Amino acid sequence: MPPTPDPKRDAEFEILVKELEALHLQTDPALAEIAPARIARRMRTEMGVAAAIKGAKMAINDALEMLESAAPEQRELANSRLIESGCPPLHVLMAGRAKVARHILRQRRISNELDYYLLREVILGPAAWLTEEQRTLGSSLLADYERRTNGAV
């Protein structure tokens, strides 16, 4: 029996797909099959909305990580595409990512795989707002999560 549709989760998924489409700056038609939004829709069909939401969030986080070190023109293009799509602007998405990372550091615990990858990318990336103490704490939290999951991340 197929799962009962959940309008709230469906709406969340559609918002994430809009953000993915706006953040995907690749214009080569030969790569259309691997566009993150297309992959997310396929995941939804094959694995369900929960898995698709998780995958879409990971893909958005990856895109935001790449945009941190992108040329200003690419960042502006992504920002304008987000705004044109009715999504939050790039600085809002980046601030949300930093807010989640700060929350994880304050809690001193990584609770799931999404948080693990987000914190990992922030710790290993060029996040200028991190102090050395926060980087050290983050590295320790990553190692602890890897131990708890037996390295299954």
Image (cartoon, grey):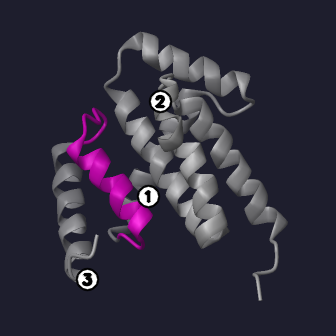
Is label 1 in a helix, a strand or a loop? helix
**Of 128 and 125, which appears nearest the observer?**
125
**Of 29 and 124, which appears nearest the observer?**
29
Foreground disc of the pair 1, 2: 2
Q: Give the numbered dot on residue 103.
A: 1
> In what quadrant of the picture does the N terminus appear?
bottom right
Q: Position of residue 24 (x, y in %)?
A: 52, 32
The amino acid pointed to by label 1 is His
- Give the residue displayed 44% in from the left and 58% down from the top: 103
Foreground disc of the pair 3, 2: 2
Sequence order check: which comes first, mark 3 or mark 1?
Answer: 1
Farthest residue, direction front: 30
Label 3 CA crowd tier, 10 Å (few <14, some 14–19, many 20+) = few
- Give the residue displayed 68% in from the left and 24% down from the top: 83
- Give the residue displayed 60% in from the left and 68% down from the top: 46
Is label 2 in a helix, a strand or a loop? helix
Q: Position of residue 147 (x, y in %)?
A: 19, 80
Sequence order check: which comes first, mark 1 or mark 2?
Answer: 2
Q: Is residue 59 magenta?
A: no
The amino acid pointed to by label 2 is Ala
Q: Which residues are magenta?
A: 110-130
Query: In this image, 32 relative to 67: left or right?
Result: right
Q: Which residue is mark 3?
A: 148
Q: Give the numbered dot on residue 30.
A: 2
- The answer to whether residue 119 is seen in the rendering is yes
Q: Position of residue 54 (x, y in %)?
A: 53, 62
- Give the residue displayed 63% in from the left and 22% down from the top: 81
> In what quadrant of the picture does the C terminus appear?
bottom left
Q: Is residue 113 magenta?
A: yes
